[in-house]
Image (cartoon, rainbow, N blue to C red):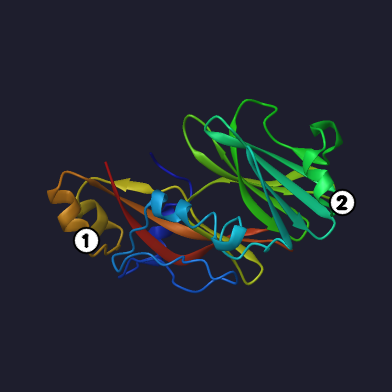
Amino acid sequence: MKSCFFPLLIGLMLTACGSESGSSETGGDTSSDPNGVTSRTDSLQAITQQRGEPGIPGSDIPEQFWAMEDGACYAYGQRIVRVARSGAGEVVAVFSGSGRGQCDASLAQAVFSTGTDGDTETFFGIVGDLLLLERTTDEEHLIRIVDLASGSVVYETPYEEPVEIRDGGLLYGEPAEEFESQEDLNAVGVDCPESGVWFEDSLAVGVSIRSRFDLTSREATLTDDVTCIPLL
């Protein structure tokens, strides 16, 4: 798989490879291991945070939380978000209001809802007027950002973990470029500390650049942070 951003790696000529560390506003753990490897399983365990706080690290904390038979319901100011399990994903519905009664409203009353096009979606949190979702297709995982004021999708992109909200931006990894030999890695100036072990174990090495989507300007830019990932 060749990704469109990857030629920029050559210009970076990085000598180290690892994910950027830091604490989130909600206290979620976004650290990776010392070798810059972050597993999707580990990261998704942090998606549902403690004390009924859903969403990726750094997303808004709900003011109230109600458990429901098929999921949960969260209050964010004058919005209620109902998350109901549905197959491998969730049906996410957002309603105007602030009371528990909105948790039982019909989808026809929602200002926005998922589950209408057959794709699997998961609630990734709320940030102000923006709803964050993960959409899973047969080929990839995508982050979707919905402007609840207009009901329109303002950003959608494939991503790699780790993912978080920090300093007014959504930070995520670009789809990884795959390398099958140490020589190929050396040719672009990337040093992945564990690459030798992974190649010996018959694994490929994925290299992912981290991007930042500014939630105010709604523009995405590449950072100089790179993560190395073992690939089957």
| Residue 57, visible in the rendered structure | yes
Left or right position of 42 against 16 = right
- Compared with 27, 70 (above or below) is above
Amino acid type assigned to the residue bearing label 1 in the image: Glu
**As rendered, which of 140 and 56 lies closer to the eye?**
56
Label 1: few (<14), some (14–19) or many (≥20) C-alpha neighbours in 10 Å: some
Q: Position of residue 227 (x, y in %)?
A: 37, 60
Find residue 138 and report its horizontal and vertical position in percent. Answer: 48, 29
Q: Tell me: 174 left or right of 75.
A: left
Point 29% across, 63% down: residue: 189
Q: Is residue 208 above or below residue 169?
A: above
- For this rendering, which residue is in front, 178 or 59? 59
Mark 2 Cα shell of 10 Å, populated few (<14), some (14-19), many (≥20): some
Quadrant in which the C terminus appears: top left
Residue 101 in the image, given as x and y percentages of width and height: 83, 45
What type is the residue that disc 2 sits on? Gly
Tell me the quarter of the image containing the N terminus. Answer: top left
Residue that numbered label 2 is attached to: 97
Residue sitting nearer the eye, 131 or 223 = 131
Q: Is residue 5 left or right of residue 75?
A: left
Q: In this rendering, which labeled residue sits more in front, label 2 or label 1?
A: 2
Is any atom of residue 217 visible in this view?
A: no
To which residue does mark 1 refer?
Answer: 194
Q: CA distance from mark 2 to mark 1?
A: 51 Å
Count of marks, rendered view: 2
Report whether 169 appears left or right of 182.
right
* Residue at image location 37% in from the left, 48% down from the top: 177
Looking at the rendered structure, the secondary structure element under dot 1 is loop
